[in-house]
Image (spheres, rainbow, N blue to C red):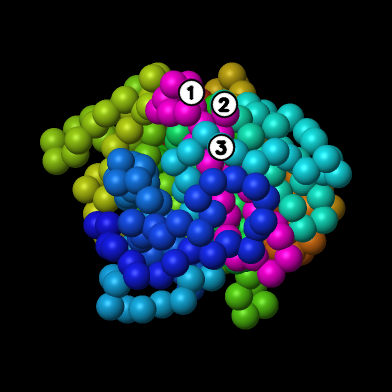
């Protein structure tokens, strides 16, 4: 629900662009892992799009009467009059498309005519300019733009994205499965949930440090599974769920896991095991214990923004280091046997028992 606010946005940035002191017509506040994030837009269409997007995450809308102070603001400018990138920043290409420039206190990202910028000293604001080209406003570029802006904002209040699935063993140990797309994260999370484990997310988590430990917070609400896993995990037999095609992967079916695995969702956990997963064609799975240095190296490899976003890099790397010290790391070579839910649970529990 969009709520009209009476505050005037006054960003610290002074880069030349129109509308810098505009009064936002719509703003939403969200709570996540003890932080508060304000999302502001002057265009009702963009505001409704943002509401739909953030409804797919495990973040809680904050009612206006709660009157919280935002830790970080994200302001969307519905304008093609973007600022030019500063010349003193180091540019690099981003795997999903676009170019990022970072250095010192500044972060500047551009793709498909849109820009995400932040980093001026003392600023707690991420600014977004949405390009006017049709390709800027297509579904996939807009989703990536919103995600990029949100993750930039979250890093600036101590929340760090992790492309991982999160589950909790029957004894209460948090387990992360980390790997690129196609490495079996969603498949394993669904099988373990079907075997009775608790779950956070099948793909997207946030890391944060609190009271001397690293914790994870669930981010994406929906599960996305291949047909094979969809059936093997027992999802196909559930009549109470709505299924759709995953927007960026037509080979996967997307669904809300809560009706399928009732009472098993947990919003956060403390990771004690980390699986770096890769799929093998072998019938049987293998697992290999990693030392702390190997675990850290793999975490950095899977978290490139810990190095790319210079403003938050030191704190980001510190959280990854804490995680590597806190949790046992394993290389998981996933075989066909993990398509069986009972086998998947028994296999991992037996390997964890000695550590």
Residue that mark 1 sits on: 133
Q: Is residue 263 left or right of residue 11?
A: left
The x, y position of residue 341, in whole percent, is: 39, 39
The residue closer to the viewer here, 303 or 326, is 303
Residue in the image at 73% along x and 30% along y: 93
Secondary structure of the residue carrying tag 2 is loop
Pointers 2 and 1 in contact (C-beta within 8 Å): yes
Secondary structure of the residue carrying tag 1 is loop
Residue that mark 2 sits on: 112
Residue in the image at 56% along x and 51% along y: 127
- State how far apart marks 3 and 1 are (Cα): 12 Å
User: Which one is earlier in the sequence, the residue at label 3 or at label 1?
Assistant: 3
Crowding around mark 1 (Cα neighbors within 10 Å: few <14, some 14 to 19, many 20+) is: few
Write down the quadrant of residue 158 in the picture. bottom right
Q: Is residue 108 magenta?
A: no
For the N terminus, the quadrant is bottom left
The residue closer to the viewer here, 18 or 145, is 18
The residue closer to the viewer here, 144 or 321, is 144
Magenta segment boundaries in residue numbering: 113-141
For the C terminus, the quadrant is bottom right
């Amino acid at each position: 629900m969009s709520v009209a606010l009476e505050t005037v946005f006054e960003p610290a940035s002074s880069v030349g662009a129109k509308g810098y002191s505009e009064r936002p017509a719509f703003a939403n506040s969200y709570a996540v892992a003890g932080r508060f994030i304000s999302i502001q837009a002057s265009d009702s269409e963009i505001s409704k799009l943002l509401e739909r997007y953030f409804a797919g995450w495990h973040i809680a809308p904050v009612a206006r009467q709660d009157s919280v102070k935002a830790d970080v603001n994200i302001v969307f400018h519905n304008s093609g009059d973007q600022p030019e990138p500063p010349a003193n920043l180091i540019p690099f290409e981003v795997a999903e498309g676009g170019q990022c420039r970072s250095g010192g206190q500044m972060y500047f990202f551009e793709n498909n005519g849109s820009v995400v910028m932040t980093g001026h000293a003392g600023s707690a604001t991420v600014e977004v300019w949405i390009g006017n080209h049709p390709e800027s406003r297509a579904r996939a570029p807009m989703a990536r733009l919103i995600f990029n802006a949100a993750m930039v904002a979250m890093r600036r209040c101590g929340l760090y994205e992790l492309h991982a699935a999160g589950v909790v063993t029957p004894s209460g140990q948090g387990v992360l499965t980390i790997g690129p797309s196609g490495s079996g994260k969603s498949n394993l999370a669904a099988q373990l949930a079907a075997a009775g484990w608790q779950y956070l997310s099948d793909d997207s988590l946030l890391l944060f440090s609190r009271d001397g430990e690293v914790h994870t917070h669930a981010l994406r609400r929906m599960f996305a599974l291949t047909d094979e896993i969809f059936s093997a995990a027992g999802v196909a037999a559930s009549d109470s769920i709505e299924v759709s095609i995953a927007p960026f992967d037509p080979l996967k079916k997307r669904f809300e896991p809560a009706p399928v695995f009732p009472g098993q969702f947990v919003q956060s956990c403390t990771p004690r095991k980390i699986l770096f997963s890769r799929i093998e064609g072998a019938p049987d799975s293998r697992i290999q214990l990693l030392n702390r240095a190997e675990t850290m190296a793999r975490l950095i490899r899977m978290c490139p923004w810990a190095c790319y976003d210079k403003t938050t890099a030191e704190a980001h790397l510190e959280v990854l280091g804490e995680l590597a010290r806190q949790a046992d790391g394993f290389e998981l070579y996933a075989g066909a046997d993990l398509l069986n839910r009972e086998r998947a649970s028994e296999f991992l529990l037996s390997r964890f028992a000695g550590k």
